[in-house]
Image (tube, rainbow, N blue to C red):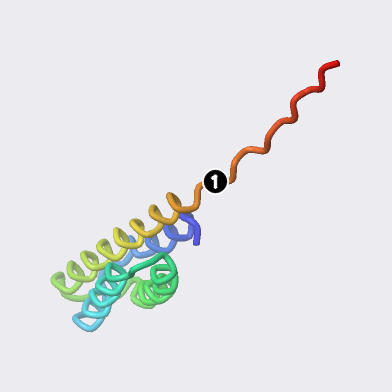
């Protein structure tokens, strides 16, 4: 998953006024816990679509301030943990080396 997709997915949540309440905030907290417990990039990449689906399902819902704050705090934590794994993946998978230019033949 590229960074553009990540930004778009989490950017959609910026328009989230709130979620429908405790249930949604609890679920986002569970996602944050799971993301932060990931031991590898594959785990984070597998979990990310679930988080994205959950955020889109709750986009625009209004509730109590406390639930909205918990939801957004958990979402921020999820994002930070995901970013950590993507940074690690970038370090582990450096760009390919530039092709060697053949030396001109001398006579």
Frontmost residue, 64 versus 55 = 55
Residue 27: x, y in percent? 26, 80
Frontmost residue, 72 versus 19 = 72
Residue 97: x, y in percent? 59, 41
Which residue is most to the bottom? 23
- Kindly state the secondary structure of the residue where label 1 is placed: loop
Residue 28: x, y in percent? 27, 75
Residue tagged 1 = 95
Occupied quadrant, residue 67? bottom left
- Tell me: residue 103, above or below residue 83: above
Residue 102: x, y in percent? 75, 30
How would you rate the neighbour count of disc 1 (Cα within 10 Å): few for under 14, some for 14-19, many for 20 or more?
few
- Name which residue lies at 21% across and 79% down: 26
Frontmost residue, 61 versus 29 = 29
Q: Quadrant of the C terminus?
A: top right
Occupied quadrant, residue 84? bottom left
Frontmost residue, 7 versus 91 = 91
Occupied quadrant, residue 80? bottom left
- Tell me: residue 84, above or below residue 60: above
- Name which residue lies at 41% across and 70% down: 48
């Amino acid at each position: 998953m590229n960074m553009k997709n990540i930004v778009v997915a989490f950017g959609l949540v910026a328009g989230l006024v709130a979620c429908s309440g405790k249930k949604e905030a609890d679920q986002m907290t569970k996602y944050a816990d799971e993301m932060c417990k990931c031991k590898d990039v594959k785990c984070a990449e597998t979990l990310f679509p679930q988080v994205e689906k959950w955020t889109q399902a709750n986009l625009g819902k209004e509730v109590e301030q406390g639930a909205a704050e918990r939801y957004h705090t958990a979402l921020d934590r999820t994002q930070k943990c995901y970013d950590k794994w993507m940074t690690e993946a970038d370090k582990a998978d450096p760009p390919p080396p530039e092709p060697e230019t053949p030396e001109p033949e001398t006579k």
